[in-house]
Each structure stands twice: as structure tokens, then as C-alpha cells.
Amino acid sequence: MPDRFERLNVTGMTCGSCVAKIEHALDGFSGVQHVHVDLQQGTVMVSGDAALSREALESAIRSAGFGVEGGPAVQASSFTPLLVAVSLIGLGSLVSGGVDGFMAKFMGGFFLVFGGLKLLDLGGFAAAYAKYDLLAARLPAYGWVYPIVEVALGLAYLATPEWMGLHAITFLLMTFSALGVIRALRRGEQLTCACMGTAFNLPMTTVTIVEDLGMAAMAGAMLVQHSM
């Protein structure tokens, strides 16, 4: 199980060969367990054990011929992928049937899209998720299974939105997920949010808490609605 997770903003990457050079420079590096290079975002995400040194990683990347910028700053533009995805899912849910059944359709689309993004890089997601999720930190296998759980929830919300057990499971899952995020933020940890997998470089902020608790609130509302 990874003990540390570092995200570095790397300059000078222009092609697949650059990606390969950075991966070669870091693979087998002391303390490194997993390396994910995002050419489009210009980031390198590294997970490893407690001996992992950010300074040493930066030095290795510079030795490979690339630059490393300072720590990631949280900017509004960082959340553009998240906002676009949520907006499109919401719009699609409205167009497909109006307000009636909106929450179930929204949650179905949300879980399918976000779970699918996590599946693109299971190893990278599991490493990032283990840094803040309370269960994944103790049971690494949970991080590998979680994206599949999300996809299954998405399908269930589209197929059987009236099932009360589905809403109860989602409420508990998203509330529990929010607890890990809250703990990490209270500790002042600067982590990458794994909500969209490793496809996008999203910083973890209170937006992540709003996302988790918002889904929990909708599940709770549907649970109450179907129990009446």
C-alpha cells in the first residue's frame, strides 16, 4: 500500500518519447511504486513508500532533461473538467425525461461516467484513492474494486431506480467517502482528487466534499421518497 503520493508539474514534455523518458527515469527509483505521466496536463503522479522524496523525484526528472514547476496551485480552471462533466450529465438527465426522475438519471449518468474514467487507469486511481479514503488506505484491494462498484451503481440507477436498497447503499458509500476527504483536508494535505481517476489533474478541495455529500443527499432524498 502506498504511503505517499506526489504530483509534479513538469515542463518540456512534448511527445510519447518524453513520457517514456520520464517513466524510465522514475521506474525502479527508490521508494517508487507507480508512475503515471499525463502528457496533456503536463503532470507526473508518483506513489510510493515513506522513503519517497519529492526533492529526489524532481532531481531525477530534471536529470532526464525536463523542468519541474512549484507545487500545484488551486485555480478555478482546475475544475473545468469536473464542471463540464457534471453539467452535461445534468443536461442529459433533464432532456431524457424532464424533472420527473431527474435525480436517478443524474446519478446513473454520474456513476457511469466517473466510474468509467477511473477504470482507464485502475492502478493510478487505486494509488491516489488510498491516500485519503479510510478503507482503501487499510485495504488496497478496495481501491481496485471501487470503480466497478460505481459503474454497477450507475447501471442500477438507470435500470431499477425504485429499489430502496440502492439508495441506502449509495447514501452510506458516499457519506463514508466524504469522511476520508474531510480528514485529509483537516490535516492540510495537498492531494490529487481521484474522483475522475487520473485522466484529469484535479486538486482535492471542499469541492470534493460537496460532490460526495451532494450524491449522498440525493440518495437520501430518494430513499425517503420511495419509503413514503
Image (spheres, helix red, strand yellow):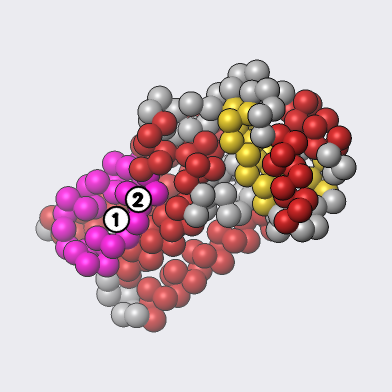
Residue drawn at x 21%, y 64% is: 161
Instruction: Kindly indicate whether the residue at mark 1 contacts the one at mark 2 (C-beta within 8 angstroms).
Output: yes
Q: Please name the predominant secondary structure of the magenta segment in the image.
A: helix
> Magenta residues?
146-175
* Picture coordinates of residue 164, whole percent (x, y): 16, 54
Q: Amino acid at mark 1?
A: Ala
**Horizontal arrangement in the rendering, residue 63 relative to residue 184 (left or right):** right
Q: Which residue is mark 2?
A: 148
**Residue 78 visible to the viewer:** yes
**Residue 43 visible to the viewer:** no
Label disc, if present, on residue 152 of the rendered structure = 1
Residue drawn at x 59%, y 61% is: 81
Magenta-span inclusion, residue 8: no
* Picture coordinates of residue 35, whole percent (x, y): 63, 39
Task: Work out whether residue 29 or residue 98 is closer to the camera in this orientation and state it.
Answer: 29
Q: Secondary structure at mark 1?
A: helix
Q: Amino acid at mark 2?
A: Ile
> Circle 2: is it few (<14), some (14-19), or many (20+) Cα within 10 Å?
some
Magenta-span inclusion, residue 160: yes
Residue drawn at x 51%, y 68% is: 87
